[in-house]
Image: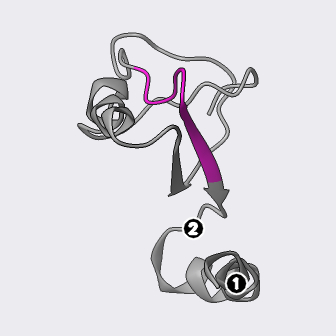
């Protein structure tokens, strides 16, 4: 995620992928691990994931078991959002 809140995927889940859900829903909220970046290199992340009607709820970024355990309490706190 760039400082302006734009999300760029490391995968195939770009904005057109999420936009198809807007045919049924008024809004799409994607829960995802988000890494903060300063700027975008268009050669590595050319497509945006966020856009009109598609927003991202940030889950703390972690990689591997050690970082997962370090963020476990924050992740458990998010479970209340699904109740």
Seen at 37% across and 26% down, the residue is: 15
Seen at 69% across and 88% down, the residue is: 76
Seen at 69% across and 28% down, the residue is: 5
The overriding secondary structure of the stretch rendered in magenta is loop
Vertical relation: 23 (above or below) 81: above
Q: Is residue 59 magenta?
A: no
Q: Tell me which label, 1 or 2, sits earlier in the chain.
A: 2
The part of the image, by quadrant, that contains residue 47 is top left
Residue 33: image location, x then y, percent: 54, 57
Which numbered tag is attached to residue 32? none
Report the quarter where the N terminus lies: top right
Residue 66: image location, x then y, percent: 57, 85
Q: Is residue 55 magenta?
A: yes
| Alpha carbons under labels 1 and 2: distance apart | 8 Å
- Which residue is denoted by mark 1 in the rendering? 70
- Residues rendered magenta in the picture: 48-57
Report the quarter where the C terminus lies: bottom right
Residue 2: image location, x then y, percent: 66, 26
The part of the image, by quadrant, that contains residue 23 is top left
In the displayed structure image, the side of residue 28 where residue 80 appears, left or right: right
* Residue count near mark 2 (Cα–Cα under 10 Å), binned few <14, some 14–19, many ≥20: some
- Which residue is denoted by mark 2 in the rendering? 62
**Contact (CB < 8 A) between labels 1 and 2?**
yes
- Which is nearer the eye, 82 or 26? 26
* Residue count near mark 1 (Cα–Cα under 10 Å), binned few <14, some 14–19, many ≥20: few
- SS of the residue at dot 2? loop
């Amino acid at each position: 995620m760039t400082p302006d809140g734009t999300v760029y995927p490391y995968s195939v889940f770009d904005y057109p992928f999420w936009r198809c859900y807007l045919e049924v829903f008024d809004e799409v909220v994607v829960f995802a691990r988000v890494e903060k970046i300063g700027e975008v290199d268009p050669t590595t992340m050319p497509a945006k994931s966020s856009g009109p009607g598609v927003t991202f709820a940030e889950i703390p970024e972690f990689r591997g078991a050690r970082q997962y355990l370090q963020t476990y309490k924050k992740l458990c706190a998010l479970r209340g959002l699904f109740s």
